[in-house]
Image: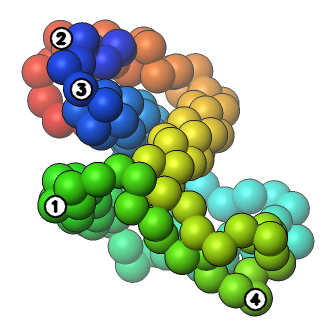
Amino acid sequence: MPSLVPPVAGEREGLLGYLAQQRDVLKIAAYGLTDDQVLQRPRNRSVEDYESGLRLESNEMSASALGRYDEAATRTEAVVGGIADLRQAIPVSRGVPWYPQDIEAWSVRWVLLHLIEETARHAGHADIIREPIDCATAYQLMGQFARGNEEP
């Protein structure tokens, strides 16, 4: 797994390439951890309440969660591959408090850029969470992955 996106021939390839790279960095945060380590719980009760629907439960295994993540990535690439024009409008949902009320639609291009931004943000969070477990960070784990030549 290279730490940089290879040169790209076009915009769509570049957007999907950067998204895939950020997804890999996010997934690598779990590389080599046991399921018990992945299920590490936050100490702050209000954070725990908020994140209860966003984390693995004790009956879920990290491998199955990463498999579902890969399936979502594959579906995203297929959908984007089927859209002829990245300027295509995607309506902005109404009633979501953090969405702007003065915008009718985002372009597919904007949605992809936002997805890259959010994935990169969460990859950083995963790196921060991983480091106290065993002092490993994304670049160290990429090196281990490259030497072991197995999927993160």
Residue 91: tell me if it is visible. yes
Tell me if label 1 and label 4 are in contact, CB under 8 Å: no
- Name above or below for residue 85 compared with residue 99: above
Q: Quadrant of the C terminus?
A: top left
Mark 1 neighbour density, 10 Å: few (under 14) some (14–19) many (20 or more): few
- Foreground mark, 3 or 2? 3
Spatial separation of the CA atoms under disc 1 and disc 3: 15 Å
Q: Quadrant of the N terminus?
A: top left
Name the one closer to the observer, 102 or 132: 102
Residue 43, image x, y percentages:
81, 58
Residue at the disc numbered 2? 147
Tell me if label 3 and label 4 are in contact, CB under 8 Å: no
Which of marks 2 and 3 precedes in the sequence?
3
Q: Residue furthest left?
A: 149
Q: Residue at x 65, y 74 (%)?
A: 104
Spatial separation of the CA atoms under disc 2 and disc 4: 49 Å
Q: Dot 3: what SS?
A: loop
> Identity of the amino acid at label 4?
Gly
Spatial separation of the CA atoms under disc 3 and disc 2: 31 Å
Q: Dot 1: what SS?
A: loop
Residue at the disc numbered 4? 95
- Name above or below for residue 23 compared with residue 39: above
Residue at the disc numbered 1? 82
Residue at the disc numbered 3? 10
Which of marks 4 and 3 precedes in the sequence?
3
Residue 151, image x, y percentages:
17, 35
Which of marks 4 and 2 precedes in the sequence?
4
Q: Dot 2: what SS?
A: helix
Would residue 41 be found to the left or right of residue 136 on screen?
A: right
